[in-house]
Image: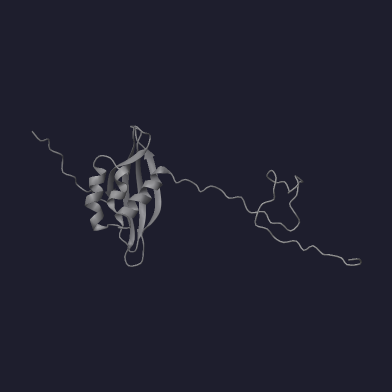
C-alpha cells in the first residue's frame, strides 16, 4: 500500500534479551527498545548452622513439628530430652501468636562443637534456649543437648543389663 506508514509500538517483555549477559538480541550492547530486563535473582542466604538448629528446635518445642522430625539431627541424650520436653510445648503459641526466634548466637568449644543460645519471643514474653552442636564423622552437625531457661530434661542414666 503506497502512502501508508506503519508504526511499531514496543511491547514490554519479561524475558531477558538473547545473547551473552548484558547484550541485546543481535549481540549489540543494548536491549531492544522498550524491553525490560528482569532483576538478577540472588540465591537465598544459607542460615548459620546454629540458627538453622534453633529454628528446628523451636518448631518441635512449639508443637508445630513432631519430635521424630529431629531424629537425624540429634545424638546422645538430646533426642530423649526433646521427647520429654516437647509434650509440654514450652514454646507453644498462645492463641494465634506463634513463637519467633529473636536472636541466636554460638561460641565454639574446645572439642570442635558449638554452644548456642537463643532468645525466643512468645506471646507472654521472652524465653531462653541453649543447645550444644557436635560435628559428626560425616561432617554433619547434630544437636547433643537442649536446655530451656533453666528447664533441663533429666534423662535417667542407662543401666547395663547383665
- Seen as rendered, the residue at the extreme left is 162
Q: Is residue 50 visible?
A: yes
- Seen as rendered, the residue at the extreme front is 1
Q: Is residue 134 above or below residue 67?
A: above
- 149 lies left or right of 37: left
Q: Quadrant of the N terminus?
A: bottom right
Give the number of callouts.
0
> Which residue appears at 28% of the width and 40% of the height?
75
- 71 lies left or right of 10: left
> Which residue appears at 75% of the width and 49% of the height?
30
> Which residue appears at 31% of the width and 53% of the height?
60
Q: Nearer the viewer, residue 156 or 102?
A: 156
Q: Quadrant of the C terminus?
A: top left
Q: Nearer the viewer, residue 67 or 149?
A: 67
- 145 lies left or right of 97: left
Q: Is residue 148 visible?
A: no
Q: Nearer the viewer, residue 80 or 126?
A: 80
Amino acid at each position: 500500500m503506497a502512502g501508508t506508514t506503519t508504526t511499531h509500538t514496543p511491547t514490554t517483555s519479561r524475558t531477558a534479551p538473547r545473547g551473552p549477559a548484558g547484550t541485546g538480541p543481535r549481540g549489540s550492547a543494548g536491549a531492544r527498545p522498550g524491553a525490560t530486563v528482569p532483576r538478577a535473582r540472588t540465591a537465598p542466604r544459607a542460615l548459620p548452622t546454629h540458627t538453622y538448629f534453633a529454628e528446628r528446635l523451636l518448631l518441635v518445642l512449639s508443637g508445630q513439628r513432631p519430635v521424630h522430625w529431629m531424629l537425624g539431627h540429634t545424638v546422645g541424650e538430646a533426642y530423649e530430652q526433646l521427647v520429654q520436653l516437647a509434650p509440654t510445648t514450652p514454646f507453644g503459641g498462645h492463641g494465634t501468636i506463634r513463637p519467633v526466634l529473636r536472636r541466636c548466637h554460638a561460641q565454639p568449644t574446645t572439642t570442635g562443637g558449638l554452644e548456642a543460645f537463643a532468645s525466643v519471643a512468645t506471646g507472654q514474653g521472652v524465653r531462653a534456649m541453649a543447645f550444644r552442636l557436635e560435628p559428626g564423622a560425616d561432617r554433619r552437625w547434630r544437636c547433643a543437648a537442649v536446655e530451656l531457661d533453666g528447664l533441663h530434661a533429666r534423662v535417667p542414666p542407662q543401666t547395663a543389663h547383665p
